[in-house]
Amino acid sequence: MLVTRHSMKQLLIACLMLPIAGPLIAADWPQWRGPNRDGTWTETGIVSSFPSTGLIPKWKAPVGFGYSTPIVSNGRLYLSDLIAEKPVVHERVLCFNARSGKQVWMTQHDASAPDWFFNPAQMRGPGSTPIIHNGRVYALSMFFGLKCFDARTRTAAHRLSDRRREDAATTRRFRLEVWRGGFGRLMEGLLAGDD
């Protein structure tokens, strides 16, 4: 199934409307499947059923292609996406104020893609979800670039490949593993000692 910009926007809206009762965002959800990577939400005061009139969106934001799950940390929501404008794709990491939906910052990396990528049946976006670790956002692009930004300011902290040049085998293993799966990859082992 082709994921369109409209369907990604609807997914983002749905994720933001889940905590209907109480504050919009109460606890951090800093990585795929939550704080403990187990998909367990421990908040209290949630509704047991949706209103018959449906949910009322708190805010909406346009986003591109991708399968990234929104993550939340310190009142901000982060998401990876991709905008395709043949022959270039714009791989982005977006940061929003979780309460208002106002875009706080965005990064963009342009990459070339083969012609077949622009076929609607082939087009997709990043398959991984960003992660927050020690005040930094790590995001894996669709074309194997691992970026690191200060979560508050978007300042580029470093690129993993630059820091680990001496360990080319680690980078090759990481790229191979991403190529084989692409979705829900854990970066924990690569972030160890990243202070």
Image (spheres, helix red, strand yellow):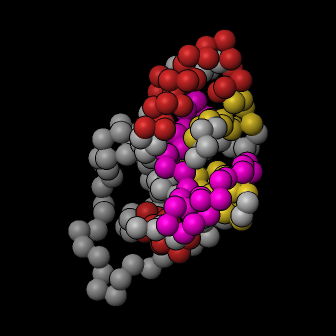
Q: Quadrant of residue 185?
A: top left
Q: Quadrant of residue 155?
A: top right
**Residue name at image x 66 percent, y 26 percent:** 161
- The quarter of the rendered structure image containing the C terminus is top right
Q: Where does residue 166 sit, x and y in percent of width and height? A: 66, 12
**Residue name at image x 62 percent, y 70 percent:** 62
Asked if residue 40 is among those painted magenta in the image, a careful observer would answer: no
Q: Where does residue 183 sit, x and y in percent of width and height? A: 43, 45
Asked if residue 109 is among those painted magenta in the image, a careful observer would answer: yes
The residue nearer to you, when weighing 115 against 152, is 115
The residue nearer to you, when weighing 17 against 3, is 3
The residue nearer to you, when weighing 150 against 42, is 150
**Residue name at image x 72 percent, y 51 percent:** 112
Determine whether 168 is above or below 140 in the image: above
Horizontal side of 128 relative to 159 (left or right) equals left
Q: Where does residue 135 sit, x and y in percent of width and height? A: 61, 34
* Range drawn in magenta: 107-136
- The quarter of the rendered structure image containing the N terminus is bottom left
The residue nearer to you, when weighing 41 against 159, is 159
Count of numbered circles on the image: 0
Determine whether 34 is above or below 115 in the image: above
